[in-house]
Amino acid sequence: MSTDARHAKKYRAVTAFQRRVNPLLRRLPGQTLLETTGRVSGLPRRTPVGGRRVGDTFWLVSEFGTRSQYVRNIEADPRVRVRLRGRWYRGRPTRCPTTIPWPGCGSSPGSTASGCG
């Protein structure tokens, strides 16, 4: 199986899993959420994310880069909100042009690191 075929298979499996689990995770009070505006619907879209706050900047890595729906939403409308420990923060993400190795994350091809300050 080629690398592209493996990546496509992983993408399908992960997104199918996330469609079932994310609605549950969004309800947890301690879960970090990224809120974007839907590029077609214009409605708020909340996505559970992992990341870290460093100073006034919140860093996250998109596992599937620009294939992630929330990244596409950000490209259409860069205004976002991030919920950290139950409190909402407004920001505008900045896309890093290259993969940045983060301790413990390694570097995966196609990942997108974003800082939101």
Image (cartoon, rainbow, N blue to C red):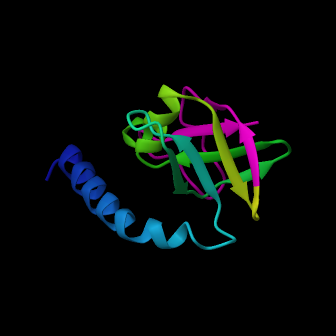
Q: Is residue 13 left or right of residue 21?
A: left
Q: Quadrant of the C terminus?
A: top right
Q: Is residue 82 left or right of residue 89?
A: left
Number of dots carrying numbers: 0
Q: Is residue 83 left or right of residue 96?
A: right
77 in the magenta segment: no
Residue 108: where, in percent of width, then height?
Answer: 45, 46
Residue at left offset 72%, top offset 45%: 58
Q: In the picture, residue 18 is in which quadrant?
A: bottom left
Q: Is residue 43 above or below residue 19?
A: above
Residue at left offset 49%, top offset 28%: 75
103 in the magenta segment: yes
In this picture, which residue range is highlighted in magenta?
88-117
Of helix, strand and loop, which mostly describes the magenta segment?
loop
Which of these two is toward me, 53 or 6?
53
Residue at left offset 59%, top offset 47%: 35
